[in-house]
Structures are given as structure tokens and as C-alpha cells.
Image (cartoon, grey):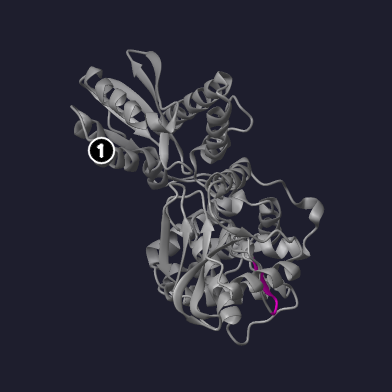
Amino acid sequence: MPKGFDTSRPLTPQLFYQYLQCPHWIWFDHYGDQSKKKELSALQQKLLERGVMHEEKYMKDQDVIEVREKNITEAAEKTLALMKKGVPRIYQGALISGRWRGRPDILEKKEGSSSFGDYHYIPIDIKSSHDIHTAQQLQLVFYALLLEDVQGLRPPKAGIINIDHKTILFDVSIGLKRLSAVLEGIYELLDGKKPDPYLTRQCSETPWFGECKRTAEEKNDIALIYNIKKPAMQALRKHKIKTVADAAWMDPDELTHIAPGLTKRELERIKRQATSLMKQEMIVKHPAKLPAATTYIYFDIEGDPFYAMEYLFGFLMEVDGKEKYTAFIAERPEDEEKMWKEFLEWIPTLPKDYLVYHYASYEKSRLTMFEKKYGGGEGLAEFKERLVDLAIVIRDSVVLPLYFYGLKDIAKHLGFTWSHSQAGGAQSIAWYEQWLETGDRKILDTIIEYNKDDVVATRFLKEWIEGIKK
């Protein structure tokens, strides 16, 4: 454990995930009104369930010694005894050093001297992901430092057993610097220092997002300004630009380059966004210039990050005033390539003169990924050239009095409604997972209806931005 780090509150590995999602999560958990805490989102609940299922499946045939003690002190004593015996693999072992405590999924014996002899242990977690995420890496480095206190040697490697049951190791030393910075922030939170307001999409997935938003709104804080980066906020606060009103009245010429990336152009963007928020009015920069065609197609993809796959391509096509919705679906993860091939076969049937509208970069990036993964087909290159990203068009044309510029944020602000009250990308993923588990066709039909709403909303935004005049 690094010297100088101590706190009266125990430090546990889940704090790293919470910190990276939203530092306020930790602060509100310890100091907030617990009656204001919401349930975890459907996506996070599914993530936890998926992790448990993956771990149970992997451990089914593993040769390990399990530490069953629930009391962490007793579990740590049992773990130490097993390590001294040189047990090859310890499952759910416990590690304690001062206020630090944790239970890595597996402690695996490796060659290399330690206080136990000519061997040492490395920490390995079982994760339902393909690669090691930042929070997972920090947790494993944390375990490595705990092991250093226990066995007298910092393990050089740590890793995960991923969703494919492959072991992925990394060099512990590469995570030490970041861990130190994150630890400092976590300790400040545990000691009661409330962070400045900061709103992000990640924050919106936490149980405390409502309180984060309320705090920012009470202060009319600059965190409410769309797409303002943390370094920019910190620099502006130091120059007494703390509220939305301050930002609306600031002089960009005086503040240019007070932080990296805070150019005059970016300051002018922040000022416009703040002005829109303060007045609760849309600002038109210039009318949108949209290309024309005889056929318009509206495109939206649904994907599942847990399986690292896409499960639905949805299209709404307008030809001569008539519309038709078409969906290509991977009913099972193994059907993804089949879905792609069906989509490729569909492209040559399209009219000669068409444009494809989508919202944000996801659809375009997925098409490129699929082409690399499964190969292309006739007309795919032309299809990609005909893509029009409405998110770019809207951001270039108008400024909206919103905290976020997602498809649903803007469409709902303008009066569009989804047929399902829980509609959202995270909910769609949860529905797909439920479909895989139950085979209930009603759930799959709900996903299709949700996607159809998304492409209709995309058309709604296209027609709205076309109608804006200076």
C-alpha cells in the first residue's frame, strides 16, 4: 500500500467502478439522503446478473480451493493459511492491509520468490467482457498492492478470465500511476469532500443522477452546459466563471487558452450553449443544408456490448410518400453474420436515388466493423457514401437549451414520444438479454417496436431541422 494513504473508512474495489462512473456516487452513498437513491438501471442490473452467471459457468469445472468464510477477517486468515501451504488456485480469497480489503475471484500460484518461498500469487478476476476495462484494471492493481503487503512481493502480472474463458494478463506497473491519482480522489470523497457538479452520460446511469442534476441546477452550475469537458470547467471556475449565467456573459477573447483545448472557438460554443440554457431558447446559427433524394431511408442499429455484437438493423424507407419498416435481426449471437448477409442482399434492391439518415456515429462505425469482420457486398461502399449524420447537422445548425444532445433528448424536447415508457438503448439491451434467456417472442417484438420508434424519431428530427429558417 502506498505510504500516506489512509482513511477511517474501508477502501474496497467496487469504489473504483463507482468513481469512474461518477465521483458523486461515492459521496452520496456516504453522505447523501439515502431516500433519494434510485435503483440501479436495467443495464447495470443485467451487467451484475451476467457477471454472476459467467462466473458460475466458468467455476463449474475448476480445480480450486474456495474460501467460504463470509467474515472478511476470518476469510483473510484462511486465505493466508492456504497461501502458506502453496495451494495452486484459491477462489474467493480475502486480502486485508490496514483499511484496504478485497476478495479477488482467483489467486493463482506462479513461480517467483516471495515470503512464502519460491512462489507467489497473482490476482485474477472473472469478467463477462472481452477485454480488460479501466475499472477492472484498477481493481486488479489494487489487489496486487494488497498482495505485496501479504506476500512481500508485488505480483508483476494480473488479469481477467474473459467471457470466452481466455486469460488476459497485463503488466501491473502500467496501472500504478493512474491508481494513485484515483485513490487520492476516492479518499477525498470518503473524507467528506463533495466534488464540483459534473454531468455526463455515464453519470446518468448511476443511482444518484437525480441528485447530481438537482445539485447542478440549484447552483445553475456550468456543469449543465452541453459537452463541456472537465479540464475546461476547472479552468473556467478558477477564472470565476462558475454559473451558466457567468458563461453566457463571459468574453472569449479574455479566456482563450487558459486550458489546453480551450480555444476561442470552443469558448464561443460554450457561451452560445450557456446563453441558450439561460434564456431557454433555441439559437439558430444557420439553416440546415440537407442533400435531397427521391428516396429517404432512416437507419438505427441495436447492439449488445456484453456479447460484443449487434442484434438489429432497422430501416424506415420512404418512397413516393409511402413508408415501409424493414428489420434484420440476429435472434441469437451466432446469427450476427447471417443478419449481415441478409442486409447485404437487401442493398442492391434499393432505388437508385436514395439517402440514409442516422443519428450519431454508431451506425457508420458498425458498418465498417462488420465489413472487416464478415466482408462486404455489392453496393455497400455506395450505401456508406450515402449516409447522412443528423447529429452533425443539428449541432452545426442550432443550439438547444439541453444538457445532452442524444436522439431522445432532442426528440422528446421537441414533443416526440416513444411508445414504451422505458425506451432507451440500455433498456433495449436488457430486453435482448431477457429474450435470449426466455425465448419470449413478445420481448423480441418489443425490441422491434422500440427500434421502429427510433427510426421514426430520426425522420422527425430530419423534417424538423429542414423546417428551421434563420
**Position of 22 relative to 304 (above/below):** below
Q: Seen in the image, is 368 located left or right of residue 310?
A: left
- Does residue 278 appear anywhere in the picture? no
Q: Nearer the viewer, residue 182 or 167?
A: 167
Residue 135 in the image, given as x and y percentages of width and height: 53, 62
Identified at 57% across, 58% down, the residue is: 64
- The boundaries of the magenta stretch are 98-102
Q: How crowded is mark 1: few (under 14 residues within 10 Å), some or many (20 or more)?
A: some
- Residue 115 can be seen, yes or no: yes
Quadrant for the C terminus, please. top left
Nearer-the-camera pick, 290 or 86: 86
Q: Name the residue under label 1.
A: 371
In x, y percent, where is residue 368? 28, 41
User: Left or right: 217 with respect to 390?
Assistant: right
Residue at image position (47%, 77%) is 177
Q: Is residue 433 left or right of residue 32?
A: left
464 displayed left or right of 98: left
Q: Is residue 384 above or below residue 192?
A: above
The three-letter amino acid code for the residue at tag 1 is: Glu
Give residue 334's position: percent from left, percent from top. Answer: 39, 32
Prevailing secondary structure of the magenta residues: strand
Could you tell me residue 230's position as x and y percent? 52, 66
Q: Which residue sits at x=67%, y=61%?
A: 67
